Image (tube, grey):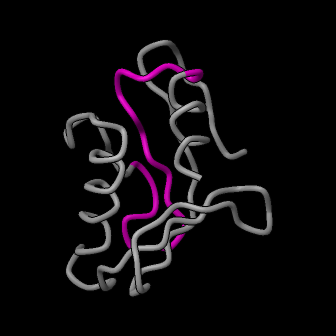
Amino acid sequence: MNLKKKNNSFCEISIRVSPGSSKNCLENDSTGGFKLRLTAPPVDGKANKECIRFFSKKFKIAKSSIEIVKGKSSRMKVLKFDGLSYDELTGMLQNLI
C-alpha cells in the first residue's frame, strides 16, 4: 500500500490517476497501489479538482483538508489528508475498494 504515516494530524497517499474514464472509482492497481479512475478530462486542472472532490465526498471531509502535494501535472500524485490518522485513512480506503 502506498500510504505514508506522517504524524497523528495527517497522512499522505500515492495514487495513479486515470482521467477520462467512464466512471469515478478507486481500485487496486497491478503494483499493489491505488488507481483512481475519473470522468473529468486532464485539462485545466479539472481532473485534479475531481480527485479532491471524489475523496472529500467519499470520506465526508472538507475539500480544504485534501491537498495534492506532488504530481499536479502528472498521473502519479501524492495526496495529503489533514486531520486523518493512518488507521482512519486505511479503513476508509479499504471500504472504497
Is residue 94 positioned above or below 42 on the image?
Answer: above
The residue that appears at 23% across and 75% down in the rendered structure is 46
Q: Is residue 60 left or right of residue 74?
A: left
As drawn, the residue found furthest toward the top would be: 8
Residue 80 lies in the magenta stretch:
yes
Residue 62 lies in the magenta stretch:
no
Question: Observer-nearest residue: 90 or 7?
Answer: 90
**The quadrant where residue 91 appears:** top right
Q: Position of residue 45 (x, y in %)?
A: 24, 73
The residue that appears at 40% across and 48% down in the rendered structure is 69
**The quadrant where residue 56 appears:** top left
Image quarter where the N terminus lies is top right
Q: Is residue 27 left or right of residue 79?
A: right
Question: Observer-nearest residue: 71 or 10?
Answer: 10
Is residue 83 positioned above or below 29 on the image?
Answer: above
The residue that appears at 36% across and 49% down in the rendered structure is 55
Q: Position of residue 87 (x, y in %)?
A: 59, 21
Counting every numbered tag in the picture gives 0
Q: Position of residue 73 (x, y in %)?
A: 39, 73
Q: Position of residue 18 (x, y in %)?
A: 49, 78
Residue interval drawn in magenta: 69-87
The residue that appears at 26% across and 85% down in the rendered structure is 43
Question: Observer-nearest residue: 78 or 85?
Answer: 85
